[in-house]
Image: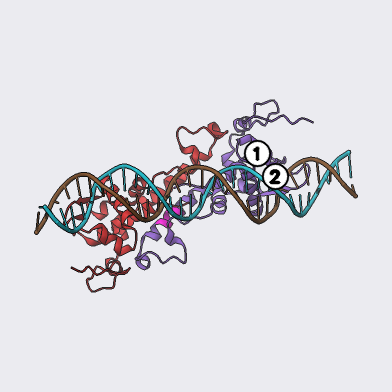
Chain colours: A red, B purple, C cyan, D brown
DNA sequence: CAGAACATGTATTTAGCATATTGCTTTTCA
DNA sequence: TGAAAAGCAATATGCTAAATACATGTTCTG
């Protein structure tokens, strides 16, 4: 049982933005801080924008910023948005009739109860819970200009 | 978020055996009743045997039978055994240090709490809960000798 | 208008799951 | 005692979806 790295990245981007406060962060900056693929992150950011979690500013000097306060972003809700498929077994799909015992099978009910418990546990936390305490996380993400970056920080030369 | 069909099959095999009572069932019989791959089911049955859920009788006239009473087989326990990996995100692995913020990341704790809630929900049910009521399930699995089989029932001719 | 930054679609790679194939071992019954 | 029935076990392969890369468009700033 795994979540997609897509969901993983989504949560991490939100954490980054929450730590950044009101400042804009670029995708390149986030990718560098975590040492992950910038290309993949662009899609994640795009979807987070569509879902209303972040607001994006295009063009030069643009970037991302949280569209809602961290304490208003509920984790279960994020996961429901980003995870492509919360169907634990094939017969969760409404059109599935492949299993012989489908009409009388109690397993579906038990599994969906478990899934609900999973999401309910996430619903008890918000993004604000994930960025407390702030200081050590900010240090690891090298917000301080003189701090050592996580990956190799490429010198941008004119 | 999905479970493997391996886990799905495991639960379904256990349900079949619970409905069958003390009688032996062959793998071929189970596969036919559900209309699924016999080859794949063999691995499932083997693992269920290793885990102590079923006892197998080899040789002519052999087959499978539950090794424990249905009300003693807790679903969460089965899932923990059959699911290859309950690590929701890569950093659940003990040797993973790929994520920059690993040391101070609160996400791991939140996610493992949710996973525990998922399993706890399953722990509140046993195999006995899944086979109640018995009659309609037995009918769908065509236990009656004159019933219509799930797949095509191949006539075994001498 | 030039360049920086996000937007968006497509293509390729990859990894893990699902399935098939094959041969072995154990047991029972004729 | 040997053949057949049934599970045991390893290996191979095909398939799907996720992950990633790539390419190009669009929008804003200075």
Question: In the image, which residues are magenta?
Answer: B111-115
Q: Would you call the spot at circle 2 few (<14 residues within 10 Å), some (14-19), or many (20 or more)?
A: many
Contact check, label 1 and label 2, Cβ < 8 Å: yes
Q: Is residue A125 visible?
A: no
Q: Quadrant of residue B29?
A: top right
- Tell me the distance, in whole angstroms, between the alpha carbons under discs 1 and 2: 10 Å
Q: Quadrant of residue A64?
A: bottom left
Coordinates of residue B147 in the picture (x, y in percent): 66, 26
Q: Nearer the viewer, residue D25 or D16?
A: D25
Q: Is residue B48 above or below residue A15?
A: above
**Marking on residue B140:** none
Q: Is residue B99 above or below residue C24?
A: below
Letter of the chain that mark 2 sits on in the rendering: B
Q: Nearer the viewer, residue A120 or A52?
A: A52
* Mark 2, secondary structure of its residue: strand
In the rendered image, which residue does mark 1 sit on? B30
In the rendered image, which residue does mark 2 sit on? B64
């Amino acid at each position: 049982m795994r979540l997609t790295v897509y969901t993983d990245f989504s949560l991490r981007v939100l954490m980054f933005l929450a730590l950044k406060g009101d400042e804009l962060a670029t995708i390149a900056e986030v990718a560098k801080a975590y040492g992950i693929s910038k290309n993949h992150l662009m899609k994640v950011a795009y979807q987070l924008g569509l879902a209303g979690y972040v607001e994006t500013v295009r063009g030069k000097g643009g970037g991302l910023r949280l569209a809602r306060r961290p304490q208003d972003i509920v984790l279960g809700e994020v996961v429901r948005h980003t995870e492509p498929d919360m169907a634990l077994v094939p017969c969760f799909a409404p059109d599935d009739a492949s299993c012989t015992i489908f009409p009388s099978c109690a397993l579906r009910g038990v599994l969906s109860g478990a899934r609900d418990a999973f999401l309910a546990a996430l619903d008890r936390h918000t993004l604000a819970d994930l960025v407390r305490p702030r200081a050590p996380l900010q240090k690891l993400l090298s917000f301080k200009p003189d701090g050592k970056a996580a990956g190799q920080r490429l010198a941008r030369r004119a």
